[in-house]
Amino acid sequence: MASIIVRRRNLLAQLWSDRNPQGIIHCLGSSRCLKTLAYEEVRVSEEKPYTSTAFVLHGLLGSGRNWRSFSRNLALQLSHSSPSSEWRMVLVDLRNHGRSAEIGFDPPHDMVNAAKDLAHLVRAKGWNWPDVVIGHSMGGKVGLQYLESCANGDFGDSVALPKQLWVLDSVPGEVSPRNEDGEVEKVLRILQTLPSSVPSRRWLVKHMMDLGFSKSLSDWIGSNLKKSGDHETWAFNLDGAIQMFNSYREKSYWSLLERPPAGTEIAMVVAEKSDRWDSNIIQRLENLASREPREAHGKLSVTVLPKAGHWVHVDNPKGLLDIIAPKMASLA
């Protein structure tokens, strides 16, 4: 079986990365400096140069490491189906999240700047533009903004649009006001009442469960803590993350879905058991996807992932692999 290489700085032995724990500042010319996102790479082999790149974007209050296991399995499956290709998965920590929270990006903290951060990373590292972008939840909307900005020329004339954009269980339009009392909103309100450090992860999980949240959700919130002396602190910048969530709720990308850029497929994945959707939105997506393709436009597809709630990569990882891997393999 092929081995998996995970590249990330400041891990010992077989793991390394291209990242300073305090963030990297890249200076372009004599006066323009850019802070770049933290990330890690997942590849099947270090011996062969990679031929294609996929960016993987996590959701609200998450980090790239949430997608490490899925990305490993995706890289392996692609290696088996297309031995001549070598995929590199770049697991990004979006601004205010994971190790990027330590870097301190300038506001406003919104979808536009989150997408711009991706372009800055590509330029600063001297990479080719990603062939595929995979975004879950809020990361899906960052991906949509990234594609829209690329198509509008916001990142310059040299940009290459992704061939595929995967939007995983992320509603593309504005979030309905009737969802303002949803689970995510309740979690954010609770987190705002807590101190910046808590005694332990066990304490936090019990506290959240005592407030009526499920054990799985409470465990996930607890996974976003990091050790700081005798206490635990958040691995995200809560105020900045809330600003990003507000932007996520306000932004709509229906016009992009109606006219995808030529050469790009926007692949929407709807989780069968997710509470994010209503029938009108799904019907609108399916109507757009069923239209006759136009030569000047790209493609929109819609797939329902069975046996999965919002956490698609946890609830049905094999089903998600079976949806994504064949299409990515077709790009080789």
Image (cartoon, helix red, strand yellow):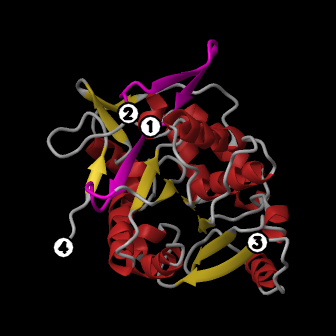
Examine the structure image and report whether residue 4 is included in the region drawn in magenta: no
- Callout 3 environment at 10 Å: few (<14), some (14 to 19), or many (20+)? some
The secondary element bearing badge 2 is classed as loop
Quarter of the picture containing the N terminus is bottom left
Task: Tell me if residue 148 comes above or below residue 114 in the rendering.
Answer: below
Q: Residue at x 66, y 53 (%)?
A: 160
| Amino acid, disc 3 | Gly
Q: Residue furthest left?
A: 13
Q: Position of residue 234 (x, y in %)?
A: 41, 35
Viewer-proximal residue, 64 or 8? Answer: 8
Residue at image mark 1:
38
Viewer-proximal residue, 235 or 298? Answer: 298
Q: Position of residue 311 (x, y in %)?
A: 47, 66
Q: Nearer the viewer, mark 1 or mark 3?
A: 3
**Splitting the image into 4 quarters, where does residue 98 fall?**
top left
Residue at image mark 3:
298
- Callout 2 environment at 10 Å: few (<14), some (14 to 19), or many (20+)? some
For the residues labelled 1 and 3, the Cα–Cα distance comes to 31 Å
Residue at image mark 2:
19
Task: Tell me if residue 183 comes above or below residue 7 in the rendering.
Answer: below
Image marks 3 and 4: residues in contact by CB distance under 8 Å: no
Q: Position of residue 301 (x, y in %)?
A: 68, 79
Residue at image mark 4:
1
Which of the two discs, 1 and 3, labels the residue nearer the N terminus? 1
For the residues labelled 4 and 1, the Cα–Cα distance comes to 29 Å
Image marks 2 and 1: residues in contact by CB distance under 8 Å: yes
| Amino acid, disc 4 | Met
The secondary element bearing badge 4 is classed as loop
